[in-house]
Image (tube, rainbow, N blue to C red):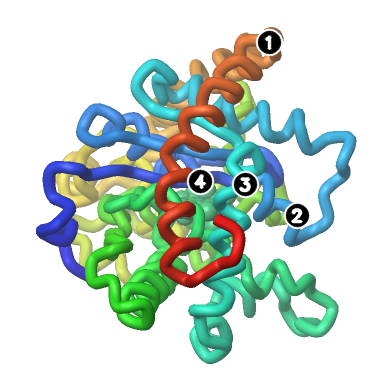
């Protein structure tokens, strides 16, 4: 994966990223994705959406889905995504995503999708009972990104493989239809200590909305008491913290908490180790709890305030949907011409 956007697109950089409305957002979503949206919205044109089409790949209660979408928007706003700078929309309000996904279904190869580890993880042992949508999920993700010709996609580490597939689809489309450079090869923006936050109960599995234990994650809506309790109860080991990263490699829980501290305070893990080397978790955890409460506490409070006025969120989604439809329309019209559709 290159570090820079392809030369042809320098000067018109654009971010697209999405979050599924499938449960409470947590510290992993915040550090892996949301804080990057906030930072990058000042650097590039930014489109952030709630992936309600993707949510349907697993059963969702229709009566609750709209409120789940609003909650994600409240989280975007509470962490500092500014609707005056960034376009915030619901995926279902831009039909171009689904239309382009069909064409990409015919570009992507079965063998490429067979390699997707997220499908294997989510489908588990009974893949024949999974929805077809869950299998083609990454194709829709490619359409989300390419409908807006994004050059940069800020995401957590778990999405890296989907971004590689997006690049493969873009390159194959450009090649098959002899349109070099039509779709940009979007770059995943994954770097940083927050790229892969692990469960607080097991440092070997990622923090996830679907983990049955609420103690495995810090939710964006948790209050100060819940946050400190979860940090206090986080699994650790009995050793003091070392003075170098190498020594953390065999200690996944310790490595994770140091990474969380680093990401929350905006420094590297090395800097954290410099401060805490030689100290045990009895000293480290209270400091981490205070830090987590000071960063996360206000976000939950702001989300609750925002959700009390659904009208404002709905207005932001309506305006964002209109803007995103306008941005995607010329690309989709051109794609239809390129592939030779009867109706344009
Ligand atoms: P979703 O809703 O599962 O997660 C939203 C974002 O949070 C990141 N993330 C994490 N980062 C660090 N540590 C963790 N433990 C952790 N858990 C989740 C995810 O990487 C993601 O950035 N497929 C996407 C949604 C999507 C999308 C897109 C993203 C649909 N279309 C187009 C980018 C571009 C997903 O399921 O994210």
* Ligand 1 within 8 Å of the CB at mark 4: yes
- What's the mark number on residue 311? 1
Other residues around mark 2 within 10 Å, as few (<14) / some (14–19) / many (≥20): some
* Foreground of the two, 217 or 95: 95
The residue shown at (54%, 60%) is 100
Q: Is the C-beta separation of discs 1 and 4 under 8 Å?
A: no
Q: What secondary structure is marked by label 4?
A: strand
Alpha carbon separation for disc pair 3 and 2: 15 Å
Q: CA distance from mark 3 to mark 1?
A: 23 Å
Q: Earlier in the sequence, mark 3 or mark 1?
A: 3
Counting residues from the start of the chain, the first of labels 3 and 2 encountered is 2
The residue singled out by tag 3 in the image is 95
- Taking the image as shown, residue 203 lies to the left or right of residue 90, namely left
Mark 4 in CB contact with mark 3 (< 8 angstroms): no
Label 2 belongs to which residue?
A: 56
Question: Does label 2 or label 4 sit earlier along the sequence?
Answer: 4
Q: Is residue 212 above or below residue 108?
A: above
- Residue 70 point in image, percent of width and height: 67, 27
Image quadrant where residue 127 sits: bottom right
Q: Is mark 1 within 8 Å of ligand 1?
A: no
Name of the residue lying farthest toward the front:
342
Residue 123 at x, y percent in the picture: 72, 75
Give SS at disc 2: loop
Assign a secondary structure to mark 1: helix
């Amino acid at each position: 994966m290159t570090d820079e956007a392809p030369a042809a697109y320098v000067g018109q950089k654009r971010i697209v990223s999405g979050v599924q409305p499938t449960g409470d957002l947590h510290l992993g979503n915040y550090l892996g994705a949301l804080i990057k949206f906030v930072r990058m919205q000042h650097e590039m044109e930014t489109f952030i959406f709630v992936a309600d089409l993707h949510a349907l790949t697993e059963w969702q209660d229709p009566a609750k889905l709209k409120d789940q979408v609003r909650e994600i928007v409240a989280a975007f706003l509470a962490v500092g995504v500014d609707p005056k700078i960034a376009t915030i929309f619901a995926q279902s309000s831009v039909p171009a995503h689904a239309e382009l996904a069909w064409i990409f279904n015919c570009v992507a190869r079965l063998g490429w999708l067979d390699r997707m580890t997220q499908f294997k993880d989510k489908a588990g042992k009974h893949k024949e009972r999974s929805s077809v949508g869950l299998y083609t999920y990454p194709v829709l993700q490619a359409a989300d990104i390419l409908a807006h010709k994004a050059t940069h996609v800020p995401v957590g580490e778990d999405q890296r493989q989907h971004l590689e597939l997006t690049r493969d689809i873009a390159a194959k489309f450009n090649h098959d239809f002899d349109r070099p450079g039509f779709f940009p090869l979007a770059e995943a923006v994954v770097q940083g200590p927050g790229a892969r936050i692990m469960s607080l109960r097991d440092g070997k599995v990622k923090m996830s909305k679907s983990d049955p234990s609420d103690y495995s994650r810090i939710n964006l809506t948790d209050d100060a008491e819940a946050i400190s309790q979860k940090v206090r109860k986080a699994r650790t080991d009995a050793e003091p913290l070392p003075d170098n990263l190498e020594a953390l490699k065999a200690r996944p829980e310790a490595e994770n908490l140091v990474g969380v501290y680093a990401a929350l305070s905006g420094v590297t893990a090395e800097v954290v180790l410099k401060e805490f080397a030689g100290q045990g978790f009895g000293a480290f955890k209270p400091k981490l709890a205070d830090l987590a409460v000071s960063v996360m506490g206000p976000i939950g409070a702001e989300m609750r305030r925002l959700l009390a006025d659904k009208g404002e969120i709905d207005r932001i989604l309506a305006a964002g949907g209109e803007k995103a439809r306008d941005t995607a329309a010329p690309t989709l019209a051109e794609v239809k011409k390129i592939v030779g559709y009867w109706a344009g």
